[in-house]
């Protein structure tokens, strides 16, 4: 059984605690932890619909447009991802992408765009995706080459985006593109592009170690109404970074959920595995391992919920706190899960074993939404500015 004493930390209010209690119960009833990966598109569509019908996606958008709270609550997003992550990586993914994909609209879009997209995101009726990375612009976002040229009442998009989660099943994409020739982070804008817009094609589906929908998109004279511009022309880089500020700590929270599950699995296995005339848990070496895992989990939780609480308390930017939470929690989860696999011995690498699937599930989190190296650079450069 997972340690839940952290719910009493002062970072949380009663509504946060109620959310995690109720979601935990829903997960226990609805998620097997072995969701069907043979057809991830169908599984993800079903999970989004289920999460929407049960009301959990209301944490992904602000209140006037189908959400629970006036503003996105980072603690609710983190607690949701942590809880879902303890049960199912795919359910966490389905939840997370609804918030991230619609994040630029929630945070910076016009009320017309919000009204058009967000209620359906919250209801699980529209699937969202965030299209930032390009073949030659991953960590270095400002190197992006996709262009958007104004033509009357429309913008015409050309270029390509890759590693796009929900690519292929999304109903709409929030796409970042260059609207003038100024280099670097200047002159980038954000657009909402419906999946069925002529000129938008799924060029390639990408298979990964923990299967989920992922694709490369190509824009070929793709015409988007000017009303689909998110916020102001030329502010796209700041909108992308501002969106990532909110959602990066939630990546750490998902890793935390995976790590907690791995520790639970390791404890229960160690208690029943007989060896040397006792159990695995009787060995001091095992106890030391479990102690180290629990320490890394609590340290992760402290960093993540500090970031979430700071944002929910009104901070304009939590770049440093979010980077620390994401960096530490994802790296620590990898170590904790690796240790859990080791404690399981041969069983730990058998396909279908929970720790084996966590081992594959956690790997991408150290890369997406800003690789660990990027987080180090962000933290270090802010240190120099102090
Ligand atoms: N919130 C708001 N504005 C921000 C910001 C944030 N979190 N971070 C940077 N900005 C602003 C800066 O203030 C700066 O504005 P001014 O020009 O007005 O001063 C502008 O954006 C450019 O910032 P900076 O010079 O730091 O940009 P860089 O190109 O050096 O960006 C990093 C560097 C590495 C931090 C950035 O490219 C990054 O986060 N990369 C990782 C991207 C990522 O997560 N990819 C995964 C995609 S989602 S799966």
Image (cartoon, helix red, strand yellow):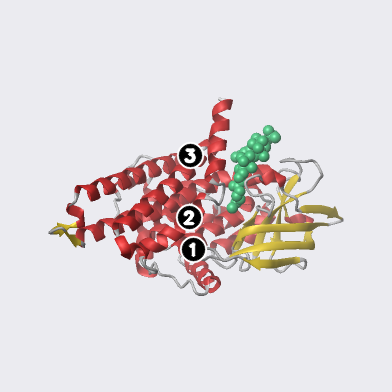
Front residue of this view, candidates 121 and 256: 256
* Sooner in the amino-acid sequence: mark 2 or mark 1: 1
Secondary structure beneath label 3: helix
Q: Would residue 130 appear left or right of 36 to someone viewing this image?
A: right
Residue 133, given in percent of the width and then of the height, sits at: 65, 53
The label number, if any, that marks residue 363 in the structure image: 2
Location of residue 217 (image quadrant): bottom right
* Residue designated by label 3: 324
Q: CA distance from mark 2 to mark 3?
A: 18 Å
Tag 2 near tag 1, CB within 8 Å: yes
Query: Image height check: is 46 above or below 270?
Result: below
The answer to whether residue 33 is visible is yes
Front residue of this view, candidates 218 and 318: 218
* Residue designated by label 1: 210
Query: Image height check: is 338 above or below 12?
Result: below
1 vs 3, front mark: 1
Secondary structure beneath label 2: helix
* Sooner in the amino-acid sequence: mark 2 or mark 3: 3
Q: CA distance from mark 1 to mark 3?
A: 25 Å
Quadrant where the image shows the C terminus: top right
């Amino acid at each position: 059984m997972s340690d839940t004493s952290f719910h009493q930390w002062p970072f949380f209010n009663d509504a946060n605690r109620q959310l995690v209690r109720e979601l935990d119960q829903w997960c226990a009833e609805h998620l097997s932890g072995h969701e069907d990966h043979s057809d991830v598109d169908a599984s993800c569509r079903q999970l989004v619909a289920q999460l929407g019908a049960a009301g959990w996606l209301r944490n992904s958008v602000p209140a006037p447009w189908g959400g629970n709270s006036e503003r996105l609550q980072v603690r609710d997003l983190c607690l949701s991802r942590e809880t879902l992550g303890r049960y199912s990586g795919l359910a966490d993914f389905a939840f997370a992408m609804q918030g991230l994909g619609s994040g630029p609209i929630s945070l910076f879009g016009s009320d017309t765009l919000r009204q058009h997209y967000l209620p359906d995101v919250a209801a699980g009726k529209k699937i969202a995706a965030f299209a930032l990375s390009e073949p030659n612009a991953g960590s270095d976002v400002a190197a992006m080459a996709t262009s958007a040229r104004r033509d009357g009442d429309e913008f015409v998009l050309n270029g390509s985006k890759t590693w796009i989660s929900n690519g292929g099943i999304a109903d709409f994409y929030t796409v970042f593109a260059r609207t003038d020739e100024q280099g670097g982070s200047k002159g980038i804008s954000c657009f909402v592009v419906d999946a069925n817009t002529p000129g938008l094609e799924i060029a390639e589906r990408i298979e990964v170690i923990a299967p989920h929908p992922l694709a490369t998109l190509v824009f070929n004279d793709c015409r988007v109404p000017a009303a689909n511009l998110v916020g102001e022309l030329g502010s796209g880089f700041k909108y992308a970074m501002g969106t990532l500020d909110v959602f990066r700590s939630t990546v750490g929270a998902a890793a935390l959920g995976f790590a907690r599950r791995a520790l639970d699995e390791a404890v229960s296995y160690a208690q029943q595995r007989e060896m040397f005339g006792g159990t695995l848990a009787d060995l001091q070496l095992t106890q030391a391992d479990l102690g180290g895992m629990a320490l890394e989990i609590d340290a992760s939780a402290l960093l993540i919920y500090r970031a979430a609480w700071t944002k929910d308390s009104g901070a304009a930017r939590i770049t440093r706190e979010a980077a620390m939470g994401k960096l530490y929690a994802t790296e620590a989860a990898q170590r904790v899960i690796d240790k859990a696999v080791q404690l399981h011995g041969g069983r730990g690498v058998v396909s279908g074993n929970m720790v084996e699937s966590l081992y594959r599930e956690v790997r991408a989190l150290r890369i997406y939404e800003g690789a660990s190296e990027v987080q180090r650079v962000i933290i270090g450069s802010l240190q120099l500015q102090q």
